Amino acid sequence: MLGFAAAGLLLGLSGGLAPGPLLALVASETLRHGVRAGVAVALAPLLTDPPIVLAALLALRPLTGQDLPLALLHLGGGLYLAWLSLESLRFRGAALPPVASGNALRRGVIANFLNPNPYLFWLAVGAPTVLAAWRLEPLAAAAFIAAFYLPLVGAKAALALLLNRLRHALRSRGYVVLMRGLGGLLIAYALLWLYEGGRRLAMG
């Protein structure tokens, strides 16, 4: 169970800090409308992700125990994680696009629904991990999900608090170093998924 929780923390922290539409919106809302608006955007995944997670689990559950489909999923998930790690390793700072005023939470929900990353993550990585954890112990699946969303939402909320004081945090050297360090950890996790995919492909 601790292994699944650790994986959730790594993936959630990487997703929480990775540049993307939602992170940019958190930063923009904070700088334009204050920390409460930024935190409201950070909470958007808690509203948008449950149907995505449920749909991914229902779609992949019939494949449980079938080596060939699971091998392809692991290979696809490993390649996706490798792509995310390269994005983190190439990170040099995030830009802050301007946004219009209005309801911050509503814009966060729309931005996250239209963002392909949650769909790709849950189909390629999240749902297979939850199903594997569930076979081991239902509590392990719950630990993975909780450990994933805590830093995913918490990192963005913390960034809003930080940006409320330091307006150039997204381009700071410390933030760049942190993102590149997470990229290195993601490479290791991607290699594990690729190894598991290769092993299942050989068995199939």
Image: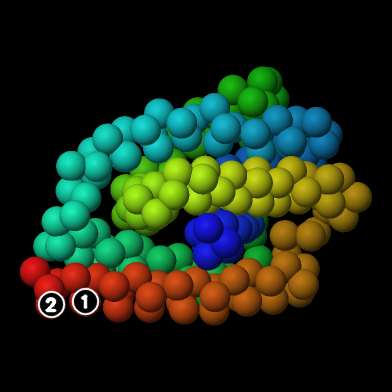
- Disc 1 from disc 2: Cα separation: 6 Å
The residue that appears at 74% across and 43% down in the rendered structure is 157
Q: In what element is the residue under mark 2?
A: helix
Q: Is residue 38 left or right of residue 113?
A: right
Disc 2: which residue: 202
- Which amino acid type is marked by label 1? Gly
Q: Please report the residue visible at 72 percent of the width from the left and 67 percent of the height from the top.
A: 175
187 to 113, vertically: above or below: below
In the picture, measured across the screen, residue 191 lies left or right of residue 158, that is: left
Quarter of the image with the C terminus is bottom left
Q: Residue furthest front?
A: 137
Residue plotted at (14% across, 56% down): 66
Disc 1 residue crowd, few under 14, some 14–19, many 20+, Cα 10 Å: some
Residue 119 appears in which quarter of the rendering? top left
Specify the farthest residue to the left: 204
Q: Is 118 located above or below residue 58 in the figure?
A: below
Label drawn at residue 166: none
Disc 1 target residue: 198
How far across and how far down the image is residue 149, in percent?
Answer: 59, 45
Counting from the top left corner in percent of width and height, residue 38 is at 74, 37
Please, what secondary structure does the residue beneath circle 1 have?
helix
